[in-house]
């Protein structure tokens, strides 16, 4: 009996260490395969439901889903040291990466995903969820995040207050009504065009050299403030895509940026 208990204990202990990642896809591709997988731990094991054919080369699988007429559910085992995971454009409808806690890079773009929980992925430096179907995104726990692409979703809010290492923020084509980047003092790129913003304060973002902010509802006062901040920051050779409704000093500030080598593109709205 003691031996049996010992075996059971070891089995429970070992299975507890097997962290999993799961996803679902409606793809019927004959060559369904992630674009990038970098895994620094035990070889990943993929298991899929349904009549699919699977070929594994190291950690990188290829599935034949040509006979799929519904949803294929997949589980990935041994993800405790999975570092990079790129599953863009694979008709993924859901994904659970909460146990892949050392992920540095996650690219889930161009998939009909409605929820994405990255609160457990505290080592993420790059997150790309472009063209998902997200209405919310919590990045408060991703405090070393450097780059985020969350454009072409349906986000109404985006809190970046804890992402103090953020350098690249791409949140275009959402439904954001406010964007506070005052804590993101390392930002170099801010693309927030085509949202519902009434204001944008970049006075604390002294390194910005690439700003795309047209397609919002900025008054001339807000536009003047943006131009004044860019002039005061002293950055040369930047790019600004904006609604050119500046007045007074704003006109002068725009001319100053041009003399400093800025490329400025005007949009009517």
Image (cartoon, grey):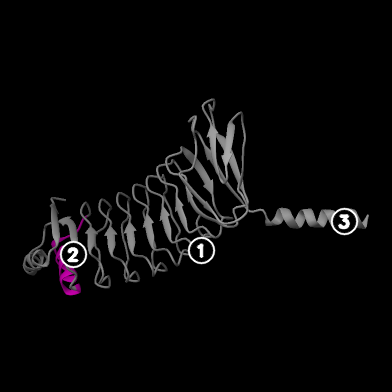
State the SS at label 3: helix
x and y, in percent, of residue 166 in the image: 37, 65
State the SS at label 1: loop
For label 1, count other residues whose C-alpha is less than 10 Å away and answer few (under 14), some (14-19) or many (20+): some
Main secondary structure type of the part rendered in magenta: helix
The picture quadrant where one finds residue 187 is: bottom left
The residue that mark 2 highlights is: 222
- Mark closest to the chain's N terminus, 2 or 3: 3
Q: Find the distance from the CA under tag 2 to the CA under tag 1.
A: 35 Å
The residue depicted at 42 percent of the width and 55 percent of the height is 127
For label 2, count other residues whose C-alpha is less than 10 Å away and answer few (under 14), some (14-19) or many (20+): some
| Residue closer to the observer: 244 or 105 | 105
State the SS at label 2: helix
The span shown in magenta is: 217-233
| Residue closer to the observer: 27 or 141 | 27
Camera-side mark, 2 or 1: 1
The residue that mark 3 highlights is: 5
Camera-side mark, 2 or 3: 3
Q: Vertical placement of 206 versus 151: above or below?
A: below
Marker disc for residue 122? 1
Image side of residue 1 versus residue 173, left or right: right
Q: Are marks 2 and 1 in contact (CB under 8 Å)?
A: no
For label 3, count other residues whose C-alpha is less than 10 Å away and answer few (under 14), some (14-19) or many (20+): few
């Amino acid at each position: 009996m003691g031996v049996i208990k010992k075996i059971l204990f070891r089995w429970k202990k070992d299975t507890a260490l097997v962290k999993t990642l799961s996803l679902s896809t409606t793809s019927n591709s004959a060559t369904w395969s992630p674009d990038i997988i970098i895994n620094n731990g035990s070889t990943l094991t993929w298991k899929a439901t349904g009549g699919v054919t699977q070929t594994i080369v190291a950690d990188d699988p290829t599935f034949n889903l040509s006979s799929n007429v519904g949803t294929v559910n997949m589980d990935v085992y041994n993800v405790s040291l999975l570092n990079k995971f790129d599953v863009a454009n694979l008709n993924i409808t859901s994904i659970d990466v909460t146990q892949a806690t050392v992920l540095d890079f996650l690219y889930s773009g161009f998939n009909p995903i409605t929820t994405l929980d990255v609160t457990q992925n505290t080592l993420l430096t790059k997150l790309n969820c472009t063209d998902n179907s997200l209405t919310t995104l919590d990045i408060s726990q991703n405090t070393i995040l450097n780059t985020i692409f969350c454009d072409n979703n349906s986000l109404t809010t985006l809190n970046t207050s804890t992402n103090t290492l953020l350098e690249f923020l791409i949140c275009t084509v959402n439904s954001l009504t406010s964007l506070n980047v005052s804590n993101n003092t390392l930002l170099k790129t801010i693309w927030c065009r085509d949202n519902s913003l009434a204001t944008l304060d970049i006075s604390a973002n002294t390194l910005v050299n690439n700003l795309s902010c047209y397609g919002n509802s900025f008054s001339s006062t807000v536009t003047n403030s943006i131009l004044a901040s860019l002039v005061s920051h002293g950055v040369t050779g930047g790019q600004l895509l904006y609604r050119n409704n500046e007045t007074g000093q704003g006109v002068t500030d725009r001319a100053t940026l041009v003399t400093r080598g800025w490329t400025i593109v005007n949009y009517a709205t």
